[in-house]
Amino acid sequence: MFRMDGKTVIVTGGAGYLLYPACRGFAELGARVVVGDFNQERLDEAVRELGDDFSPDRILGVNFDAADEASCTALVEAAVERFGKIDVLVAGTTGSAGKEVGDIAADEFDRANRMNITSPFFLARSAAGHMPEQGGSIIFISSMYGLVAPNPSDYYPLGLTPNPVDYGAGKAGLCQLGRYLAAYWGSRNIRVNVVAPGAFPWKSGHGNNDQFIDVLGRKSMLGRIGRREEIGGAVVFLATDEASFITGQVLSVDGGVTSW
């Protein structure tokens, strides 16, 4: 059980904080892993580490811009050229202007959601065209804030800005995109699911605020924030054959925050 030998997996945003553990998980199960990321330095480091720990022949890094359709297509084509097919796509890039409701401009809102909704759609459509007859798996990364609204009282008293509106709206749309495509491609045995992480803040953002981390942790039924490996485990599971009867679902990995 739980082997992926011979399968090709694309992970966009795979060199980042949240999805790098998923890349490692796929490699540990024997998959060929294509890491797509816009940050070349971070991408190079991820590819080097994965190549050192596993086989460099099974690892490919591709620099790409999630907001650009041609770049998305080029990522998929690079994966096919190297490995001949695609079995799994994990679409994990995201965008936000980081502004409050009264400050965000229309073009900023649009650009954020090219990354949040449009890019995953184009990636999924392109990848599906290269999946084998027996099917494949597509996994979108949403957020608990695609399911519930951020509570301003968790943020403003600590001098923080609530999770941005363009991000939340895009992640909500991504949940519906996953359901729609699951129905659309079901006859081809292409499964489409969504993972909605809860509180997984990293140190470059709100994760620097210990009081905020405590607030988020107390919202969870488990009394803590998430560890990034816990997203990796959920993503890898949904990609395996052991999840072959799971499609059209939004899996919340949030310690129960959205179940209260």
Image: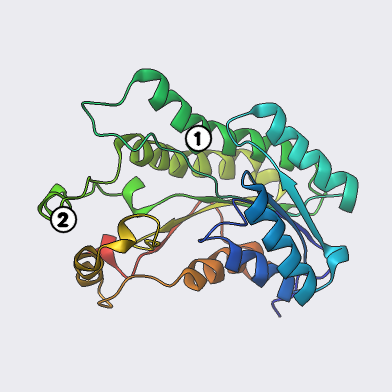
Residue 236: quadrant of the picture: bottom right
Q: Rate crowding at label 2 as few (under 14), some (14 to 19) or many (20 or more) other CA atoms within 10 Å.
A: some
Let me know if residue 180 appears in the view: yes
Q: Position of residue 183 (x, y in %)?
A: 57, 42
Q: What residue is at 76 percent from the left and 76 percent from the top? A: 53
- The residue carrying mark 1 is 117
The Cα–Cα distance between marks 1 and 2, rounded to whole angstroms, is: 27 Å
What is the three-letter code of the residue carrying label 1?
A: Ile
- The residue carrying mark 2 is 154
**Above or below for 125 versus 196:** above
Q: What residue is at 73 percent from the left and 42 percent from the top? A: 127
> Foreground: 105 or 142?
105
Q: What residue is at 29 percent from the left and 46 percent from the top? A: 163
Q: Position of residue 190 (x, y in %)?
A: 68, 49
Residue 22: quadrant of the picture: bottom right
Q: Quadrant of the C terminus?
A: bottom left
What is the three-letter code of the residue carrying label 2?
A: Asp
